[in-house]
Amino acid sequence: MAARRLLATMLATALTGATGAADVLHFELLAASETVYAEPHDIVLSGDGRRLYVADNGNDRVAVLDARSLTLLGTIGERELNAPHDVVFDAAGRLLVADTGNHRIAIYKPEGSSWRLDGQLRERLRSPEGVAVHADGRVFATGAGSNNLVVFRDARVQGEVGGFSSPHDVEFDAAGAAWVADAGNDRLVQLDEELRFARVLSGAPYGFNGPRYLDFDQAGRMLVADKYANSIKIIAPDGQLLQVLGGPRSGLGAGVFDRPEGVEVRGADVWFADTYNDRIVRYRMRPGS
């Protein structure tokens, strides 16, 4: 474990300039799953933090893992889903899945120890790869094939915005603003309440190369899986690039990745989908000294 910790710390490169030592996070690898997945994409924790739900893309299912050990506990949607990319829970405990190959957001409702398909959203979407639920109940979905973002309220389209190229994740910051991983344009876009572009992070110093999925930690930092850079990029609330974990070359081990896609943060722990290593990994984030 000491060797893994050292390697992960060495590869968590801190950017020079305004970044101070206290801003640097050290990443300790705690667990890695068995490679029983096929290009896992985005991931989400259950409300109690005990289970991790994985869009197991190549296996056409959602895999359910023990969040600590990363052992496989069960599956959802086998023989119903087609290349799912994203998963998220709504306030009612339903699981929303970006069911990409079926051009819909599939909605699963828990029934005892199993899950039942309870509905779908598909209007104006083609090949959706991202889905998120706002605190006010609206569902935001990105159409990677239709190059748009569609907002649903009570299963009806409330709004739509274009100008994207193969958009993937959509997530909300602490203020409730939506951020879109505009993968084909190598940028992140923040939307205002009217769904207008409010901020764009692109070019130097970020060097995005197909950013896929993201999440926010308790300090408001954004962790972005930058697929073709083989890295996780950590960005301050003010937009400053603080740190890069992994990259530029792919690898298998502590602190390195092969085209990562999924990110989920809960407290000091963070889970990544190490997508083309066909595994999920769990790290502990620790502040610098």
Image (spheres, rainbow, N blue to C red):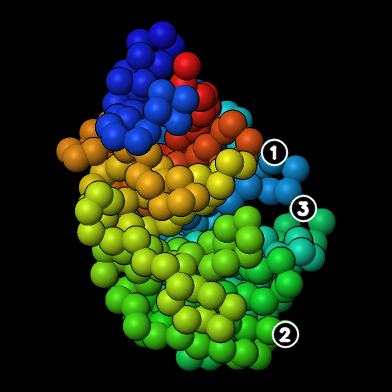
Q: Position of residue 146 (x, y in %)?
A: 37, 85
Q: Residue at x 63, y 56 (%)?
A: 174
Work out whether residue 275 can be spotted. Answer: no
Q: Which residue lies under the disc numbered 3?
A: 113
Whichever of labels 1 and 2 marks the residue nearer the N terminus, that label is 1
Query: Looking at numbered disc 3 in the image, what kind of residue is underneath it?
Result: Ser
Q: CA distance from mark 1 to mark 2?
A: 29 Å
Q: What's the amino acid at mark 1?
A: Arg
x, y percent for residue 227: 29, 52
Give the residue at x 37% y 71%.
Answer: 167
Tag 2 secondary structure: loop
**Horizontally, is 86 left or right of 89 in the view?**
left
Q: Residues within 10 Å of mark 3 (few under 14, many from 20)?
A: few
Q: Residue 200: which numbered mark, if any?
A: none
Q: CA distance from mark 3 to mark 1?
A: 15 Å
Q: Identify the residue under disc 2.
A: 154
Q: Are the two marked residues, 3 and 2, in contact with CB atoms closer than 8 angstroms?
A: no
